[in-house]
Every structure is written in C-alpha cells, then in structure tokens.
Image (cartoon, rainbow, N blue to C red):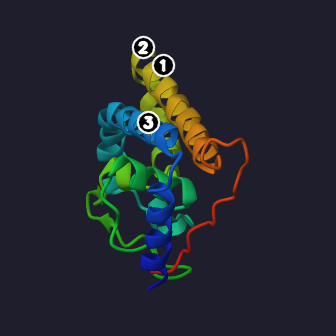
Amino acid sequence: MLWAEANAALLRLCDGEGMARARELAHQLAEALEALDPAMERLCAATCPRCLEPCCLRARVWLDFPDLLFMHLSGQALPLAQLRAGRGEACRYLGAKGCHLPRASRPWVCTWYLCPEQKARMREWGEEEKKEVEQGLERVRELRTGLVEAASKDGGSGGTRTPMPCGTGS
C-alpha cells in the first residue's frame, strides 16, 4: 500500500510543470545506463551465479527517491514492490542467475557497486574497456545528481522544494 501511495505521489510530482529539464536528464540517464549494461551484465554473469555471499542477500538496498524519480520521468518499468519486504530479507528480484530487473529498473547502487571479484575481473580487461566503464559510471552519477537538482526546482521560478522521499514498504 505504501509503495503504491509513494509512486502515485511521485507521478504527480513528475507530471508537474517545470519538469522538462529533469525529463531530458532522465532520458540521457536511461541512455547512459543502456550503454553500461553489456559490461555490467558481463561482470555479473561471470561472478554472481556462483557467488557464495551475494550482495543481494546481505546488503540493505532499496529503491530511493532518485531511482524512482528517474523511472517515472524516463518511463521505465517500475518494480511491483520495493526490493525487500522487510529488514533482513533478501532482494525479492534475485534469481539463480542474478537480478530479474532490467538495469534501468534497479537501484543505482546495484550498478555502481563492484564486488572484489568483479574488480579483479575488470583488472584483466583492456585499458580502453575499463576506462569506458569508469567513465560510464561517472556519467550516470553526474546525471543522477543533475536529475534530482532539476526536479527540486520549483517550476523554474528559482525557488526549491524538497521532494519527499519514497517509503520503503511494499
């Protein structure tokens, strides 16, 4: 119930006037995530299925305000519920071969966090490929920051409003 209410409120915010710049940044962010996806999936495919301690089980991860703002503004598919039903529970979207969610519907932390084994695998890659991933991650980070700043502007009038963070309930 809280999940639906939070997303309904966010949808109203995203439909508001003055969101053109935020919407443009959200679409750029979707493109940046799409460009990163093959390399990230390659890393995940090589490490996650055989991992004895998946971060999806132990990390306290959830979809936060910038994640949901991005999804609403760029038209990404919203997960049916928050990642966890409660504290101490594994991510409900973890499957035998990794995450069931498309990259653009995952929390940002699920893209930028690289476990030690993934970092070791990346060290085996060519310099150009590593640089491309590092620059891609930085581009996504910058776009997320810009997206939240643009969405916080009050219709371009120079004032700001602080968006309410979305709940973590399902």
For the point 42% across and 50% down, the residue is 73
Pointer 1: what residue? 131
Q: How packed is label 3: few (under 14 Cα within 10 Å), some, or many (20 or more)?
A: some
Pointer 3 or 2: first along the chain: 3
For the point 31% across and 42% down, the residue is 41
Picture coordinates of residue 104 (x, y %)?
36, 48
Q: Amino acid at mark 2?
A: Glu
Q: Quadrant of residue 92?
A: bottom left
Disc 1, SS: helix
Q: Quadrant of residue 144?
A: top right
Q: CA distance from mark 1 to mark 3?
A: 26 Å
Check the image and report above or below for 145 versus 1. above
Q: Quadrant of residue 146?
A: top right
Pointer 2: what residue? 128
Pointer 3: what residue? 24
Picture coordinates of residue 84 (x, y %)?
46, 75
For the point 45% across and 14% down, the residue is 127
Specify the quadrant that holds the C terminus: bottom left
- The reply to whether callout 2 and callout 1 are in contact (CB within 8 Å) is yes
Pointer 1 or 3: first along the chain: 3
10 lies left or right of 81: right
Q: Amino acid at mark 3?
A: Glu
- The reply to whether callout 3 and callout 2 are in contact (CB within 8 Å) is no
Disc 2, SS: helix
Q: Compare residues 77 and 88 and report the one nearer the observer.
A: 77
Q: Compare residues 126 and 37 and report the one nearer the observer.
A: 37
Picture coordinates of residue 149 (x, y %)?
64, 43
Q: Compare residues 53 and 64 and report the one nearer the observer.
A: 64
Q: Amino acid at mark 1?
A: Lys
Viewer can see residue 66: yes
For the point 51% across and 37% down, the residue is 21
